[in-house]
Amino acid sequence: MEKNIRVLVANRPRLMRELVLEAFADQPDIEIVGEVVDDAEILASVERTHPDFVVIALENPGRRPTICDTVLRQYPEMRIIAVAPNHKYSVYYWASLKIHSHDVEASEESILSTVRNKTHSAGGPS
């Protein structure tokens, strides 16, 4: 059996939170691990429940909620869905690494030199 998707629901107002909970209720692969009423409790609830997703309220569409930065810095594997209670709008947030690249000559000498030269990982070729 596959692992359940763990979801923490932290939407305001209460009606929006109830609608989100209802949408997940009949999904056999989704487990609601908690419900948060006060935004100030989101981080503590994340720490306690270790969800895969957090569903939060989006007060200002077009502006990332501060809690996203706080949670994703501490839990980069977390995913956040922000739902605007007064608009038909939602946003999916996640953290990722920026991957860099640099062309390397296709020769044994060049590949060995690249492996040994750590300056490439610090900002490019030396």
Image: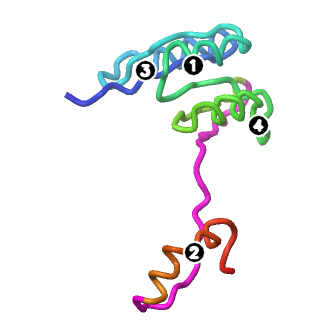
What is the CA distance from the residue labelled 1 to the residue labelled 3? 18 Å
Of residue 77 and residue 80, the one placed in the foreground of this image is 77
- The mark nearer the N terminus, 4 or 3, is 3
Q: Callout 1 environment at 10 Å: few (<14), some (14 to 19), or many (20+)?
A: many
Left or right of residue 2: residue 43: right
Left or right of residue 3: residue 42: right
- The mark nearer the N terminus, 2 or 3, is 3
Q: Amino acid at mark 3?
A: Phe
Residue under the image location 59 percent in, 69 percent down: 118
Label disc, if present, on residue 46 of the rendered structure: 1
What is the CA distance from the residue labelled 2 to the residue labelled 1? 40 Å
Q: Is 45 contained in the magenta span?
A: no
Q: Are marks 4 and 2 in contact (CB under 8 Å)?
A: no
**Disc 1 vs disc 3: which is toward the camera?**
1
Q: Is 60 located above or below residue 107 in the figure? A: above
- The mark nearer the N terminus, 4 or 1, is 1
| Residue numbers of the magenta segment | 86-108
Q: Look at mark 2 in the image and give the residue it sits on.
A: 117
Q: Callout 4 environment at 10 Å: few (<14), some (14 to 19), or many (20+)?
A: some
Q: Look at mark 3 in the image and give the residue it sits on.
A: 24
What is the CA distance from the residue labelled 2 to the residue labelled 3? 50 Å
Q: Secondary structure at mark 4?
A: loop
Residue under the image location 40 percent in, 88 percent down: 108
Q: Is 100 contained in the magenta span?
A: yes
Left or right of residue 74: residue 116: left
Where does residue 71 sit, x and y in percent of width and height?
65, 29
Q: Look at mark 4 in the image and give the residue it sits on.
A: 61
**Disc 2 vs disc 3: which is toward the camera?**
2
Residue under the image location 47 percent in, 22 percent down: 7
Residue lying farthest front? 116
